[in-house]
Amino acid sequence: MAEFDALAQSVAARLNCETSLISVVHDDAFFALGHSKRTVQTADRSVPISDAVCAHTMESGKPLRVADIRADPVLSRTPTVQALDIGAYLGVPLRLESGTVVGALCAISKESRIWQEAEQTYLEALADLVESKIERHVLRYEQKALSAALAENDAILTTLAELRGQAMTVHNDAGELVFANSALRTDLHLSYQELLALPKAAQQLAEKGRDTGEIVLDLPGRDVNALHVNLSRVENGLTLAEWRRA
């Protein structure tokens, strides 16, 4: 996270504000990939989506500029307003190349202030850089996950060959994604957040002793997705899941 922390620190310095965050959705929470505070622990980087002001930026997909958030009847009720002592807020959405909004880059001031157009322009320009770095990490993750899946288990390779063209994931017993094929995006049109939510939902179904069922994905800013899944246990604690529209 060091490179994202450095970018957040540069925002705080450039805009002369107390805090800057580079946050992305992970499971049901916003996780701060970058934080301008140098002493923030990993455990303190995560907040529920419903508690974060950045959720409003992400849901709208547009910049959010608020001079005094405590005077806003909706935003003032957001838990992090008190926790982070937010007076003024400036945030811009973060998108992957596919167009999917995955988080937000924001600047926070304890005192109310009128954000200038040039300050928003700067934040949007920096968001382009952040997006390219996130995209690079996503591609690395997908490549490593695929390599690990194929090298780790011959059974997976055989099964994937037999199921070519079907939307599928492979996850471990912790509900962590090991492999996902392109059909999840091209055929089922799932977003990046939805894709990451699939393994945990499938594992919860498996823990109930079921190998088939329906999964409902309901994420902020997205239409509700209902999917049918069939689970097949493979070797080394891995489970293969085949997905289709319910």
Image: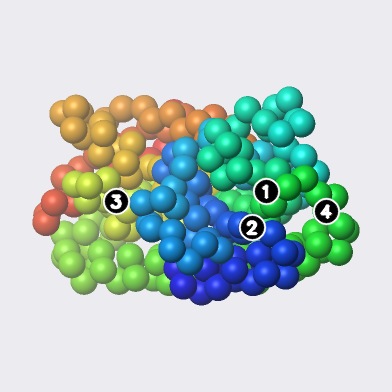
Identify residue for label 3. Answer: 176
Q: Position of residue 12 (x, y in %)?
A: 66, 64
Q: Residues within 10 Å of mark 4 (few under 14, many from 20)?
A: some
Which circle, 4 or 1, is nearer the viewer?
1
Residue 143, quarter of the rendered image: bottom left
Q: Is residue 57 left or right of residue 157?
A: right
Identify residue for label 2. Answer: 18
Amino acid, disc 4 = Trp
> SS class of the residue under badge 2?
loop
Q: Residue furthest front?
A: 111
> SS class of the residue under badge 3?
loop
**Residue at image coords 29%, 51%:** 176
Tell me, yes or no, whether the two marked residues, 1 and 2, touch with CB atoms within 8 Å. yes
Q: Position of residue 51 (x, y in %)?
A: 53, 35
Q: Is residue 85 left or right of residue 41?
A: right
* The C terminus sits in image quarter: top left
Tell me, yes or no, whether the two marked residues, 4 and 3, touch with CB atoms within 8 Å. no
Of the residues under marks 4 and 2, which one precedes in the sequence?
2
**Residue at image coords 50%, 46%:** 30
43 relative to 218, above or below:
below
Q: Is residue 210 left or right of residue 77?
A: left
* The N terminus sits in image quarter: bottom left
Query: In the rendering, which numbered label is found on residue 115?
Result: 4
Amino acid, disc 1 = Lys
The answer, for residue 134, to whether it is visible in the render is no
> SS class of the residue under badge 4?
loop
**Residue at image coords 11%, 56%:** 236
Identify residue for label 1. Answer: 110
**Residue at image coords 16%, 29%:** 209
Tell me, yes or no, whether the two marked residues, 3 and 2, touch with CB atoms within 8 Å. no
